[in-house]
Amino acid sequence: MSLAFIGLSVAIFLPALLQEIFGISIPFYSWVLLLVLILAFGYFVSFSGVKNSVRYAMVMATIEVIIIAAISIIIITARPSINTVSVFTLYML
């Protein structure tokens, strides 16, 4: 099931992100080729055994946490004037 979500991310979300945020437009056939390569790699990892699959999942999860933490730090430090603890008040409006 994770291969379906990876395929969705590569085919839909990644091109939209590159186009809207970075202004990079890549032809359709490039995305199809990239999608086929990523899904083939995922298929290979899935069927290479549980040990290899879990090891790969742990490595990728660690990389994901590091990337999210780094992006969070960049977002927080980019505009320190709007990032205050005042948003964490218990007052209801």
Image: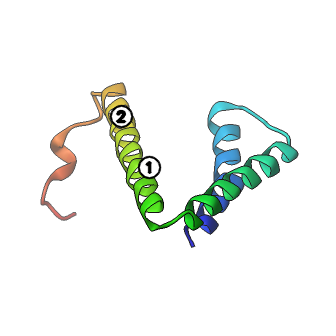
> Residue 66: percent from the left, percent from the top?
35, 40
Depth order, front residue of 1/16: 1
**Mark seen at residue 52:** none
Quarter assignment of residue 92: bottom left
- Separation of residues labelled 1 and 2 (CA atoms): 15 Å
Identified at 37% across, 30% down, the residue is 74
> Residue 71: percent from the left, percent from the top?
39, 36
Horizontally, is 18 left or right of 25 in the view? left
Q: Hey, which residue is sitting farthest bottom in the picture?
A: 1
Depth order, front residue of 64/75: 64
Q: Earlier in the sequence, mark 1 or mark 2?
A: 1
Q: Quadrant of the C terminus?
A: bottom left
SS class, disc 2? helix
Quarter assignment of residue 85: top left
Three-letter amino acid code at the position of disc 1: Met
**Mark seen at residue 70:** 2
Identified at 46% across, 58% down, the residue is 52
Q: Which residue is under mark 1?
A: 60
Horizontally, is 33 left or right of 65 in the view? right
